[in-house]
Image: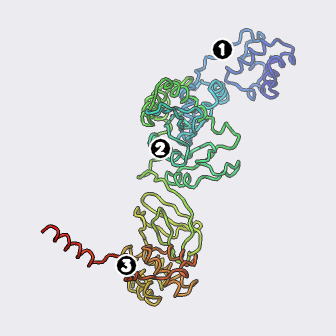
Amino acid sequence: MRHIKEILRLKAISGLSNRQIANACNISPTTVSKYLEAAAKSDAAYDDIKVMSDEQLTVLFEDSEGSNIRKSPKQMPEMNYIHSELKRRGVTLQLLWEEYRMDHPDGYSRTQFCYYYNRWKKKLNPTMRMNHTAGKKVFVDFSGDKPLITDPLTGSKREVELFVGVSGASSYTFAIAVDNQNIENWINCHIKMFNFFKGVPEAIVPDNLKSGIKDACYYEPEINPTYADMAAHYNVAILPARVRKPKDKAKVENGVLNVQRRILASLRNKTFFSLNDLNRAIAKELEKLNNRPMQHIGISRSDLFSQSDKPAFGSLPDFPFELFRWKKANVGIDYHIEVDKSYYSVPYILIGKTVDIRYTGRIVEIFCGSKKVSSHPRQHIKGKYLTLSSHMPASHRYYAEQTPKSIRDWAQKIGRKTLEFCNQLIQKRHPEQAFRSCMGIMNLTTGYPAERVEKACGMALSLKACYYRNVKNILSNNQDRLFEERKPEYVSVNHNNIRGKDYYRNMESDHAAAHR
């Protein structure tokens, strides 16, 4: 018995190998192995054994240099069940051990219970060892190996991207092919993945690709604003994998590998002529992958997802995320900004400032810094103006109420051609658009004499080019100084070689006389 405590101390405290312990205790490595195995199978850890008397050790171990060690008849815990339960929120080894002892009062102590589970867990691959909490994380990435699509006309092949999403607790897998890795496809892949899961996790763990992460900083990565908007809509957090920390995304690395082996490899000899055909085939193989029992666990990803992740996932919002686009714009003198040739007002105090525009197919929102200063329904008519009276200064509000009368009154003060030019604008364009152009003409009078503006308007009318930019170009290029209105003059010319009407009348008379 004198060797047992020393063997366990050297193993537990010093971490020596069996051969080193054997040399230190002057016994055989086989005896060391048997004592350690007996200690592992007993319900006593080193902290318990080191305070035991020789009599107690004799009861625990037969005194025969470990050759006839008594085996424990205790009930072994169900490791698959423990591993699965640990993925559920709030479940710990302590709780599972207490439940185990309720069913098996003579079962293993907590120390041995944890020891056997950890030893069993080491047999799993690294991604399965991690005890991801149910509903906590979903890992996403694009596959390095890419599927191919064949052009039906030319027969040429092109690579497309394969997006993969893996749920942390259950390894439930989603996959879809897209044309490229741009932000639109990146966002749409997430939306389809959430619909596939029928719920949303607490966090998404992406790699540091440009579509999702603008700046892959190790400590504070900057999220793409559109990606951040999507995350806010679904109430999920974005936790990018740390740079050069592959273990942060080990789950999706293994998921991508499974997709490459189980899906891409299965489809390698098939030809696809469109993304839709390819994705239908991927969906069939994906179902097989998720329904196949996993090794060492004996349960499929689908079943494990239903038991763990799905109940813990958050619910989907009432409406799917609508992809926002962003652009910057300078507010013009008419306090409007442009989106796809349509114009939207902002408060006039922002004239000359740069604003951020976030827009979808149904709404346009304008931000100055972090403050939203304006919101309009999206217009899809080129040249359409949306103006809120609250955005106008008092003077412009007056003009807006008086248009087109006030515009004509102002133009008449400049000259007849300017009035005609403005009348053309009012008759052919929307009043607000005409107001914008007329405001531009009015602004020209601050830099050019009124008579030059009048002349430039006349020149634009003669050229049938009734646009503000034409008047501005005429003035800036000094073309108005060279332009003179010319009226056509009809000149009567008398010349001996010119035959008049009398000549042709005499020819007709001679011709008639010749036929009598």
Q: CA distance from mark 3 to mark 1?
A: 142 Å
Q: Which one is in front in this view, the residue at disc 1 or the one at disc 2?
A: 2
Residue at point 49%, 28% (across, down): 289
In depth, the one of 102 and 166 nearer the eye is 166
The reply to whether residue 193 is visible in this rendering is yes
Residue at point 54%, 59% (across, down): 326
Q: Tag 2: residue type?
A: Phe
| x, y percent for residue 140 | 56, 40
Q: What residue does disc 3 label?
A: 496
Q: Which one is in front in this view, the residue at disc 3 or the one at disc 2?
A: 3
In depth, the one of 30 and 320 nearer the eye is 320
In the displayed structure image, the side of residue 291 where residue 220 appears, left or right: right
The reply to whether residue 387 is visible in this rendering is no
Q: CA distance from mark 3 to mark 2?
A: 95 Å
Dot 3 alpha-carbon crowd within 10 angstroms: few under 14, some 14 to 19, many 20 or more: few
| x, y percent for residue 450 | 52, 87
In the displayed structure image, the side of residue 81 where residue 242 appears, left or right: right
Q: What residue does disc 1 label?
A: 71
Secondary structure found at label 1: loop
- Residue 308: mark: none
Residue at point 19%, 69% (across, down): 511
Q: Earlier in the sequence, mark 1 or mark 2?
A: 1
Q: What residue does disc 2 label?
A: 194
| x, y percent for residue 137 | 56, 42
